[in-house]
Amino acid sequence: MFGKWSSTTKTCNHGSKIHIAHTKLSGSLSSDELNRAGDAVAKSREMLINAVSLTGGAWNAKMNAAAASCFLTGPGGPSQKQKEEICRVLTMTKTGACGSTTIKVGSSADANGYVNVHQDMMHKLFMSHKVKSLKDGATQYIGRAHVDREYITNDSAENRKRAILTFIHEATHRYAGTVDYDDQGYISATTYLAGNGIRFRETGLDTAQALTNADSYAVFAMEIGA
Ligand SMILES: [Zn+2]
């Protein structure tokens, strides 16, 4: 493994082991912090499992409303084809996240979270998940989910939710090939977690884009799967 990261492995619920990696530069995580990082993945798995189960069944009013906000689908609910696409993306994400997965607890300078798109052979072979982009179908090699260290080390109810939202967001990139659309695609976590609704930082996204948008899936999974 690379010198820059250390890693610890925990056995958690809903699937295989969770690997928790942290930068040596930022210092080790305490056992409480390791537990919280593992918890963020375990809770993400629970929400994804619930969301997949729900979207594969009969949709209720709460799901229709969440989809209208996250995916900009009609007030009566998504079309059958849109429902199938939402369920398909969530299923790919759930399957990946419930496998042997890693949460990389980065530095507090990170912007919420990120994944790397790998080009070199070693990263492609050993570190990445091969996935087709939902934007153009191109094959991509996506690295592991990085989550802002602040969300793990500075414990609060809000930061626990931010860690989950970020992990699911990054997992949709890695396992389902979702896309970012800058502020048109990012949902305000501050507004959402304060209970003040689901709204994009900027307007302009259309429904077709929303159905490929990472943050739409993260917030939708939390909204219906929590
Ligand atoms: Zn993203």
Image (cartoon, grey):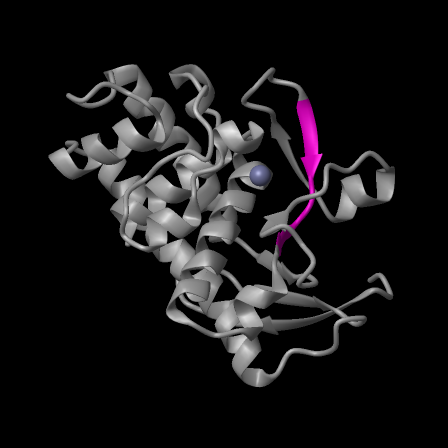
Residue 66 belongs to magenta span: no
- Camera-side residue of 202 and 44: 202
Q: Is residue 186 left or right of residue 122?
A: left
Q: Is residue 207 left or right of residue 69?
A: right
Q: Position of residue 89 (x, y in %)?
A: 43, 32
Q: Is residue 48 visible?
A: no
Please, what is the dominant secondary structure of the magenta stretch?
Answer: strand
Locate residue 15: give its quadrant.
bottom left
Q: Position of residue 107 (x, y in %)?
A: 70, 63
Q: Position of residue 32 (x, y in %)?
A: 52, 82
Numbered marks: total:
0
Write the start and end of the magenta stretch as one range: 139-146
Residue that appears at 42% across and 16% down: 206
Q: Dividing the image into four quarters, tell me where ligand 1 lies.
A: top right
Whether 114 is drawn above or below 181: the answer is below
Residue that appears at 56% across and 27% down: 181
- Camera-side residue of 194 and 16: 194
Quarter of the image that includes the N terminus = bottom right
Quarter of the image that includes the C terminus = bottom left
Locate residue 193: give its quadrant.
bottom left
Q: Is residue 75 visible?
A: yes
Whether 74 is drawn above or below 222: the answer is above
Whether 34 is drawn above or below 116: the answer is below
Locate residue 123: give its quadrant.
top right
Q: Position of residue 134 (x, y in %)?
A: 54, 22
Residue that appears at 57% across and 19% down: 135
